[in-house]
C-alpha cells in the first residue's frame, strides 16, 4: 500500500475540500464537495453526536446520493454551517431535483470546541452559516491540515487537536482517503510520550516516524481524560469522512464507515465513549468505474481503518500552536 500523490482525501477523484475559520472565535468549518452526486452512508459510535441529515443516509431510505459533507466546530451552533453550504450549492444550481427546485443534500456533524480559549460572544446569531458558505466557496483539491477549519479549536486529552487527512492506493488501484477533525476525550499519544498509537500504520514518516516507544512506558494504558475535573458531557467528539473511488451501494458504504471506526480505536485511547460523539461518513464517488470484488472489498475496508488512523495522527502532528491555546501543540511537548 502507498499514499496517494497528495496524501489527502482529494486523492479520491471527484472531491474538493474547503476550510473557513475565525481565529478569534477559535473555531471553523470544513466542507467536502462532490463534483458529481455521490453515494454516502454514516455510522455513529459515540454517545453524544450532533448531526444533520443523517437519517436519509440509511440504506433503506430514499435519497441515494449527496452533494457535500460539512464538518464543523461550534457544538450544536455549528450545525448552521450546513445551511451556508446549501446556499452556495443552490447558487450553483446543484441539488436533489424536486419539480422545479434543487435541494442540496448536505449531511453534517459537529464537535464541541466552546471551551478552548476562543471568544464565543458572537451576538444574536452564530457565525457558522457564513463560515459554511465561505468554506464551500474555497473548495479545492489542495488544502491545509492541522490547526485549520473544523480542527482549528479541537483538543485532545493533553494536546491541541487538528484537522487531519491521509490517502492510500491499494494494489488493485482503488484509492481510499480520510479526513478527520480530531477532538477526542482521550489521547492520540502513548502515555506522556510523543509517540502515536497509530504508529504501526504510518507511511513515509508522515507523522514523525517515531514508531512505538521501547520499552512501553508504565503509563501507556493509563486513561488520559480531557477536562476530567469538569462535567465531561459533550466536550469532545471526533468527526470524519472516509471516501473511495470504488463503486459502492449505500449498504456497502455503511460497512466501510463501520470499518473506518476501527481506525479511531487504533489511534485514540479511549474512544467511542458516552461523552464523545464519534461519527464517520462514508463517500463513494464511483470515479474508478469499477465495483470491488468480494476480496477487494475486504481489502478496502481494512484500508479504511488504517487510513483513518493515519489521518488522526497527521491532524495532531501538523497542528501548530495558536495564540491563546489552552493546551500545547504536539511539537511543543
Image: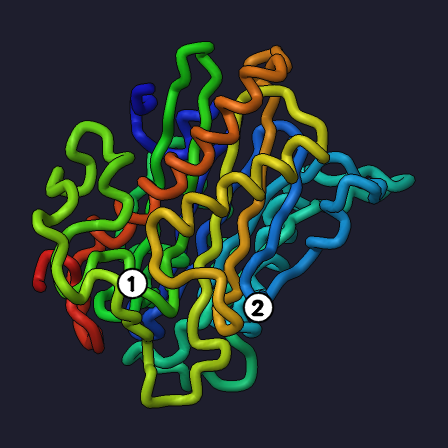
Residue drawn at the location 54% of the way across and 22% of the way down: 245
Q: Name the residue under label 2.
A: 47
Q: Which colour scheme is used?
A: rainbow
Q: What element carries label 1?
A: loop
State the mark number for residue 187.
1
Q: Is mark 2 on a helix, strand or loop?
A: loop
Q: In this view, does 230 lie to the left or right of 233?
A: left
Q: Is residue 257 left or right of residue 306?
A: right
Residue drawn at the location 49% of the way across and 61% of the way down: 272
Q: Is residue 62 left or right of residue 329?
A: right
Query: Would you identify the image quadrant in which residue 169 lies?
Result: top left
Residue occupying the far right of the picture = 99
The location of residue 294, given as percent across then percent down, is: 62, 17
* Of callouts 1 and 2, the N-terminal one: 2
Q: How far apart are marks 1 and 2 (CA)?
A: 18 Å
Residue drawn at the location 38% of the way across and 69% of the way down: 185
As rendered, which of 129 and 49 lies closer to the eye? 49
Residue drawn at the location 42% of the way across and 31% of the way down: 10
Could you tell me which quadrant the C terminus lies in? bottom left
The location of residue 61, given as percent across then percent down, is: 83, 44
The location of residue 269, given as percent across then percent down, is: 34, 60
Amino acid at each position: 500500500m502507498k499514499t496517494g500523490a497528495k496524501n489527502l482525501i482529494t486523492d479520491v477523484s471527484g472531491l474538493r475540500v474547503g476550510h473557513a475559520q475565525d481565529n478569534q472565535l477559535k473555531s471553523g468549518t470544513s466542507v467536502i464537495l462532490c463534483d458529481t452526486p455521490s453515494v454516502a452512508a454514516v455510522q455513529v459510535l459515540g454517545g453524544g453526536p450532533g448531526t444533520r441529515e443523517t437519517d436519509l443516509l440509511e440504506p433503506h431510505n430514499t435519497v441515494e446520493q449527496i452533494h457535500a459533507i460539512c464538518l464543523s466546530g461550534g457544538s450544536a451552533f455549528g450545525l448552521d454551517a450546513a445551511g451556508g453550504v446549501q446556499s452556495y450549492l443552490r447558487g450553483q444550481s446543484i441539488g436533489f431535483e424536486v419539480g422545479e427546485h434543487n435541494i442540496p443534500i448536505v449531511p453534517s456533524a459537529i464537535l464541541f470546541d466552546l471551551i478552548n480559549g476562543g471568544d464565543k460572544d458572537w451576538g444574536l446569531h452564530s457565525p457558522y452559516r457564513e463560515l459554511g458558505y465561505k468554506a464551500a466557496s474555497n473548495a479545492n483539491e489542495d488544502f491545509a491540515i492541522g490547526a485549520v477549519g473544523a480542527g482549528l479549536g479541537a483538543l485532545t486529552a493533553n494536546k491541541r487537536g487538528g484537522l487531519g487527512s491521509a490517502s492510500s492506493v491499494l494494489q488493485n488501484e482503488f484509492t481510499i482517503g480520510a479526513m478527520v477533525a480530531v477532538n477526542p476525550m482521550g489521547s492520540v499519544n502513548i502515555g506522556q510520550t510523543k509517540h502515536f498509537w497509530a504508529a504501526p500504520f504510518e507511511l513515509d514518516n508522515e507523522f514523525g516516524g517515531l514508531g512505538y516507544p521501547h520499552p512501553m512506558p508504565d503509563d501507556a494504558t493509563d486513561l488520559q481524560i480531557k477536562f476530567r475535573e469538569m462535567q465531561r458531557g459533550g466536550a469532545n467528539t471526533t468527526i470524519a469522512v472516509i471516501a473511495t473511488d470504488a463503486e459502492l451501494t449505500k449498504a456497502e458504504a455503511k460497512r466501510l464507515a463501520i470499518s473506518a471506526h476501527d481506525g479511531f480505536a487504533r489511534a485514540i485511547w479511549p474512544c467511542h465513549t458516552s461523552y464523545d460523539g464519534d461519527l464517520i461518513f462514508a463517500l463513494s464517488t464511483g470515479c474508478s468505474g469499477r465495483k470491488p470484488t468480494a476480496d477487494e472489498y475486504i481489502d478496502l475496508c481494512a484500508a479504511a481503518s488504517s487510513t483513518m488512523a493515519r489521518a488522526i495522527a497527521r491532524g495532531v502532528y501538523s497542528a501548530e500552536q495558536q495564540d491563546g491555546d489552552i493546551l500545547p501543540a504536539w511539537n511543543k511537548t
